[in-house]
Image: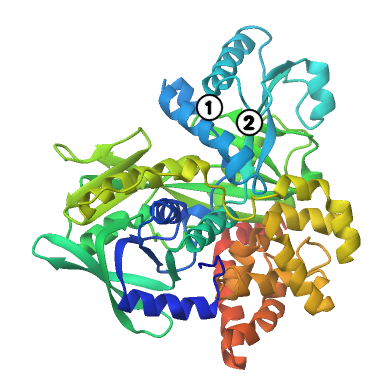
C-alpha cells in the first residue's frame, strides 16, 4: 500500500496530502529526532505528516562524529542511566535495526602511566561493558601491552605510550541512517515533504490544531490540519518558539563540534584512537579509507544555518592529536573539514517541562503542541518514542505502544545473508566484489534497486570518480528513491563526497547536475544554478582549510 520511495512524484503527492487530509500528528523537522518521531507515530497506526524546510539531515544529523556509542565521559559524571540506555540502543542498531549502516569499530585508549591509569581506565571500561549486560554483539574490552600497541598502532608515540585498553563502539553514516529512517516512516504511511517551511501555527482558542507551511520550491502556502504538532527542531527550537509566539519550558544553547578528514596514510593504525583532552575527548575514527578526527566543543552564537570550522578549530584538533602521534599530522594532509551544532538544553525554572534524561527534554507548553530538544544521535529512537508518548495525550483516544525497538529500517531485512553472498552478486551483476560490498554497506538489501538501474543502463555502473567508491547509479538512485533535489543533497548527504574528496566534490558538481537534471526536469539554467550553489556552499565550508593551506605554502 505504501512505498519508501522519495522522489519528485512522491513529493507532489505529499503536498496534495498536506493540503487535503487531516493528520493525527504533524512533525516539524527532518533530522534524526524528527524522522524517528514520524516513524514511531506511523508505526503505532497514527496518520502522520512531516515537513522539513531543507533536506533530511541537513543540520546536526549529517555533521556528527559518526559514532553510535554510550558516551564514556558520562561515566565520569555518574550518569549510568544514560550510558546504559545508549549502549542498549547501540546493540539494537548493530544487530537488528540497521546492521548494514551501523558497524562495530574498535578504539584504543592509550595509557601513559603503567599502573594507576590502567587501573582507573580499566575499571571504567569494565563498567562500560557491564552496563550493556552479558548478551552483547560487540567484544569486551581488553588490556594491551606496549608491544601489542606498537604492532596495532605504529603511529602512537612509543616514548609516551605504555600500553592501551581496546574497547568497541559503533559508527554510522549519520545522513544515510537518518534518510533510511525517513524512508521507513514513509513505508509505514507517513507523508514526508522536504523544502517545506513551517511559518505559523493554526489555533482554535488556546489549542494548536495544525500549521501553515510554505512550499519553498513553488512558493505555495498550505494549511495543514493536525490534532497535535510535534516540533523536533534542534538548534532552531528557540527561534521557532519565538516565531510561533510560544513560551517553552527550556532554552537551547548551541555548541559547535568541528572535525577534520585525513587520508588513511596520515595515521598508521588498525584501530581508532580516543584521547582525553582538557575540554572533553578527541576521537581518531577510521572512515573507509580515511580518518575523521574531532571534535571541538565550543559555544556558538552565529548563523545556525551555516556553521563552519574555523582556523582555530582545525589547529586545536591537529594540536591535540599530535600529542600522541608520530609522525605528526600535517595541515597539508587534511582533505576536508566540517562542523555541526549540538543543541544543549536547559530547563526553565518552574516549568512543566519533562526532563526525561540528562540529555533530552520534552515539553508541552500549550495544548496540541509538543516539542523535544537535546539528546544524542545514539538515542534518537528513545527520543522519538518519548515525544510521541507525550503527544498522543492530545489525541484523546487509546493509542498503541511504541514498536520501534523491534522495527528494522529499510535495507536491514536479509542483509546478513546478502553479505555472505557478495561474490555471487558480483558475478551476476558484473560489478566488482569491492563495489558490491560498498553498495551493501550503504543500501543493505535495497542493493537490488541499484542493480535494476544498472541493468537498464550499463553506463551507470561506472565510477563517479576514479578516486572514490561511488558509482553513477547511486546518483540516479538518490533522486528516484531518496528524495534528493539538488547537487548539494547528492554530494553532501546521499554520498559524503563533500568531505571525502580532495576538492570536496567541486569538480563533480556539473557531472552530478547533468545526471539528475532529466529526472528533476531542470533546464540548462537550473542545472547550472544547482552546481554553482553547491560550489559556493563548499567554498564557505572549507574557508578555514584554505586559509591554513595558504599559510603553510
**Where is 216 relative to 182, above or below?**
below
| Residue plotted at (46% across, 31% down) | 85
Q: Which residue is mark 2?
A: 274
Q: Quadrant of residue 220?
A: bottom left
- Which color scheme does this rendered protein use? rainbow
x and y percentages locating residue 50 in the rendered image: 39, 64
Depth check: give the residue in front, 117 or 472.
472
Residue extending farthest to the top is 115
Assess disc 2: are there few (<14), some (14-19) or many (≥20) residues with their C-alpha within 10 Å of its C-alpha: some
User: Are dots 1 and 2 in contact, CB under 8 Å?
Assistant: yes
The image's mark for residue 328 is none
x and y percentages locating residue 317 in the rendered image: 60, 42
Q: On the rendered structure, is 360 left or right of 266?
A: left
| Residue plotted at (51% across, 68% down) | 1
Q: Quadrant of residue 124?
A: top right
Q: Which SS class for mark 2?
A: strand
Assess disc 1: are there few (<14), some (14-19) or many (≥20) residues with their C-alpha within 10 Å of its C-alpha: some
Q: On the rendered structure, is 544 left or right of 24?
A: right
How far apart are labels 1 and 2 at the CA level? Answer: 10 Å
Depth check: give the residue in front, 69 or 43.
43
Depth check: give the residue in front, 346 or 232.
232
x and y percentages locating residue 239 in the rendered image: 28, 59
Dot placed on the residue nearer the N-terminal end, 1 or 2: 1
Q: Which SS class for mark 1?
A: helix
Residue extending farthest to the left is 205
Of marks 1 and 2, the one in the foreground? 1
Q: Which residue is mark 1?
A: 72
Amino acid at each position: 500500500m505504501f512505498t519508501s520511495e522519495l522522489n519528485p512524484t512522491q513529493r507532489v503527492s505529499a503536498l496534495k496530502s498536506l493540503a487535503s487530509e487531516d493528520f493525527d500528528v504533524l512533525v516539524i523537522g527532518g533530522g534524526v529526532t524528527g524522522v524517528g518521531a514520524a516513524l514511531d507515530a506511523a508505526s503505532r497506526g497514527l496518520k502522520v505528516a512531516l515537513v522539513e524546510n531543507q533536506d533530511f539531515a541537513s543540520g546536526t544529523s549529517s555533521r556528527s562524529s559518526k559514532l553510535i556509542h554510550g558516551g564514556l565521559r558520562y561515566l565520569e559524571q555518574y550518569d549510568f542511566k544514560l550510558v546504559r540506555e545508549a549502549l542498549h540502543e547501540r546493540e539494537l542498531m548493530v544487530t537488528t535495526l540497521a546492521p548494514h549502516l551501523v558497524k562495530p569499530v574498535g578504539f584504543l585508549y592509550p595509557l601513559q602511566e603503567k599502573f594507576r591509569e590502567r587501573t582507573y581506565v580499566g575499571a571504567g571500561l569494565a563498567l562500560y561493558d557491564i552496563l550493556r549486560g552479558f548478551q552483547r554483539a560487540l567484544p569486551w574490552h581488553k588490556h594491551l601491552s606496549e608491544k601489542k600497541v606498537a604492532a596495532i598502532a605504529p603511529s602512537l608515540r612509543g616514548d609516551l605510550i605504555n600500553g592501551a585498553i581496546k574497547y568497541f563502539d559503533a559508527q554510522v553514516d549519520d545522513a544515510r541512517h537518518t534518510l533510511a529512517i525517513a524512508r521507513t516512516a514513509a513505508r509505514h504511511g507517513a507523508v514526508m515533504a522536504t523544502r517545506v517551511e513551517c511559518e505559523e501555527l493554526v489555533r482554535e482558542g488556546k489549542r494548536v490544531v495544525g500549521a501553515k507551511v510554505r512550499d519553498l520550491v513553488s512558493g505555495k502556502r498550505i494549511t495543514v490540519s493536525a490534532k497535535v504538532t510535534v516540533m523536533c527542531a534542534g538548534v532552531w527550537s528557540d527561534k521557532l518558539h519565538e516565531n510561533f509566539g510560544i513560551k517553552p519550558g527550556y532554552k537551547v544553547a548551541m555548541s559547535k563540534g568541528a572535525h577534520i578528514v585525513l587520508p588513511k596514510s596520515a595515521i598508521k593504525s588498525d584501530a581508532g584512537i580516543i584521547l582525553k583532552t582538557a575540554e572533553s575527548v578527541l576521537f581518531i575514527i577510521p572512515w573507509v579509507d580515511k580518518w575523521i578526527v574531532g571534535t571541538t566543543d565550543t559555544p556558538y552564537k552565529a548563523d545556525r544555518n551555516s556553521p563552519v570550522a574555523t582556523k582555530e578549530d582545525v589547529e586545536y584538533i591537529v594540536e591535540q592529536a599530535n600529542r600522541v602521534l608520530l609522525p605528526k599530522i600535517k595541515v597539508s594532509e587534511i582533505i576536508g573539514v566540517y562542523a555541526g551544532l549540538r543543541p544543549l538544553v536547559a530547563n526553565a525554572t518552574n516549568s512543566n517541562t519533562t526532563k526525561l534524561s540528562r540529555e533530552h527534554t520534552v515539553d508541552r507548553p500549550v495544548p496540541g503542541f509538543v516539542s523535544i530538544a537535546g539528546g544524542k544521535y545514539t538515542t534518537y529512537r528513545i527520543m522519538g518514542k518519548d515525544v510521541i508518548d507525550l503527544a498522543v495525550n492530545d489525541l484523546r483516544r487509546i493509542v498503541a505502544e511504541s514498536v520501534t525497538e523491534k522495527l528494522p529500517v529499510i535495507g536491514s531485512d536479509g542483509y546478513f545473508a546478502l553479505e555472505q553472498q557478495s561474490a555471487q552478486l558480483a558475478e551476476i551483476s558484473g560489478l566488482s566484489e569491492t563495489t558490491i560490498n560498498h553498495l551493501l554497506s550503504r543500501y543493505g538489501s535495497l542493493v537490488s534497486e541499484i542493480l535494476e538501474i544498472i541493468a537498464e543502463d550499463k553506463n551507470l555502473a561506472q565510477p563517479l570518480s576514479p578516486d572514490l567508491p561511488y558509482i553513477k547509479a547511486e546518483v540516479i538512485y538518490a533522486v528516484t528513491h531518496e528524495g534528493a533535489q539538488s547537487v548539494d543533497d547528492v554530494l553532501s548527504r546521499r554520498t559524503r563526497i563533500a568531505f571525502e574528496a580532495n576538492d570536496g566534490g567541486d569538480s563533480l558538481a556539473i557531472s552530478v547536475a547533468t545526471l539528475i537534471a532529466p529526472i528533476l526536469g531542470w533546464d540548462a539554467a537550473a542545472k547550472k544554478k544547482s552546481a554553482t550553489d553547491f560550489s559556493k556552499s563548499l567554498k564557505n565550508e572549507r574557508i578555514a582549510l584554505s586559509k591554513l593551506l595558504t599559510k603553510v605554502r
